[in-house]
Image (cartoon, rainbow, N blue to C red):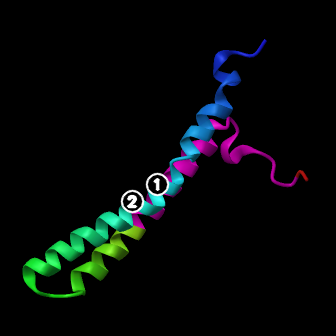
Amino acid sequence: MKSDKDRYSWARQAGMLSTIPFLMVVPPIAGLLIGRFIDRKLDTQPAFTIVFLILGFAAGVREVAIVLKRANARDGDGDKRDRSAP
């Protein structure tokens, strides 16, 4: 009989992976809003908007990489599986 950890591992992994769309959308939008706010305060349109938008995309990609790494590690075999097998 499978343990509860094994039985619901697919649900845990699906829940973790379902956060990826939010991680790809929210940080760039936050960067855009912060950049626009700073640009309006300093009257430097669009310098800070572009910088913070790029930082938002980078933060989103970084977080997605972390989530994928965790999902792969929780899969049980991580990077230790035999890649030569078909």
Q: Residue furthest top?
A: 1
Residue corresponding to mark 2: 26
User: Callout 1, which amino acid?
Assistant: Phe
Q: Residue furthest right?
A: 86
For the point 57% across and 51% down, the residue is: 68
Residue 84 or residue 56, whichever sits in front: 56
Residue corresponding to mark 1: 22
Q: In this rendering, would 37 be left or right of 54?
A: left
Locate the N terminus by quadrant. top right
Task: Say which mark, if any, is on residue 32.
Answer: none
Q: In this rendering, would 50 be left or right of 43?
A: right
Say whether marks 2 and 1 touch (CB < 8 Å).
yes
| Picture layout, residue 31 above or below residue 4 | below
- How far apart are the alpha carbons under marks 2 and 1? 6 Å
Q: Position of residue 16 (x, y in %)?
A: 54, 41
Residue 18 or residue 64, whichever sits in front: 18
* Segment tinted magenta in the rendering: 58-84
Indicate whether residue 81 is drawn in magenta. Answer: yes
Q: Is the stretch drawn in magenta largely helix, strand or loop?
A: helix
Residue 60 or residue 44, whichever sits in front: 44
User: Callout 2, which amino acid?
Assistant: Val
Judging from the image, what secondary structure is the residue with disc 1 in? helix
Q: Position of residue 12 (x, y in %)?
A: 59, 33
